[in-house]
Amino acid sequence: MAQFPDLSSSSFRALVEQSLNEDVGKGDVTTQAVVGEEQQATGRLISKDDIVLAGLDAAVEVFRLLDRQLVANIEKPDGSTLVSGDQPAVLRGKARGLLTGERVALNLLQRLSGIATLTRKFVDAVKGTGAEILDTRKTTPGLRALEKYAVKVGGGRNHRLNLSEAILIKENHIRMAGGVRQAIASARQARAHDQILEVEVTSIDELRAALEESPDAILLDNMAPTPLRRAVELARARHSKILLEASGGITLLNVRQYAETGVDWISVGALTHSAPAADLSLEIEP
């Protein structure tokens, strides 16, 4: 994945091995019964729709674990926009390896390309507004690094990879701390120097309280565009440098309305929890 060097093969190899073990079990009895051990084959990856490709290196790693002599010719790398009929990769190697790895490789490609494709749609929808599209931690267990990678491939920005990367004070934290200002004050004392401090608010009163403590960022949660615009105006008048994030109830149909309120970030959980799988297939022939 040369275009996106933040994801190395070591970050997905264990996942690929686990996925193969899950799918293959004690052995691919059908392929072993029907296909000769040394028989060679060619596999052509084919897009069946207009998509943004993501996860190609992880998919190829599936086949390399089954056949160390596999040759992969990559015609279109991750981040490429494909149309129906495009063939981003051609694989040549042992037929058994291609047949056995097909499902796992396609599962990864379809999942990650689906995320990249949906992200690109959101990014395109807010183009020119200055707002950035962010993901969330609403990811598939075990797939977070890959799914967040796919968001970046689609043009989005990653929010926290995990709970240690930044302080984000949410509703339950505020309740336990006794209020917005108390939560921010406690977090400021405890945070590391390089950690961003963000607080979630759901009302103008909470926003005013947060502004008194000057966090690095404020998440304006579940506000419709009109009250959100008022909240942005209030925040900008008080602290022009505080980053403002919108979240909750945001779809492709209304995301531009949210972007035009003047927020810096728009976080969309659907990028990773509801993206439809991209339509790709692998055609294998002798």
Image (cartoon, helix red, strand yellow):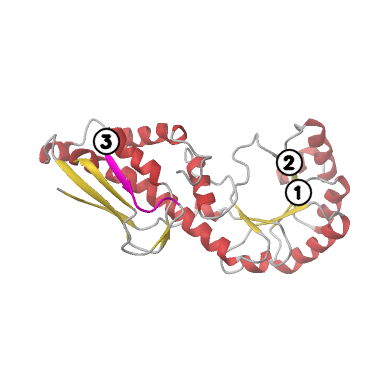
Per the image, label 2 sits on a secondary structure element best described as loop
Q: Magenta span covers which residues? A: 69-78
* 244 or 63, nearer to the observer: 63
Nearest the camera: 35 or 29?
35
Q: Which residue position is annotated with label 1?
A: 217
Queried whether the magenta region covers residue 71, the answer comes back as yes
Q: How many marks?
A: 3
Secondary structure beneath label 1: strand
CA gap between label 1 and label 2 equals 8 Å
Q: What type is the residue that disc 3 sits on?
A: Val
Q: Which mark is residue 196?
A: 2
Q: Position of residue 70 (x, y in %)?
A: 26, 38
Give the residue at mark 3.
Answer: 24
Indicate the amino acid at tag 1.
Ala
Q: Residues within 10 Å of mark 2 (few under 14, many from 20)?
A: some
Residues at discs 1 and 2 in contact (Cβ within 8 Å):
yes
Kindly identify the residue that appears in the image at 27 percent across and 32 percent down. Answer: 68
69 versus 123 height, above or below:
above
Q: Which tag, 3 or 1, sits closer to the chain's start?
A: 3
Instruction: Tell me which numbered mark, 1 or 2, is placed earlier along the sequence.
Output: 2
Queried whether the magenta region covers residue 221, the answer comes back as: no
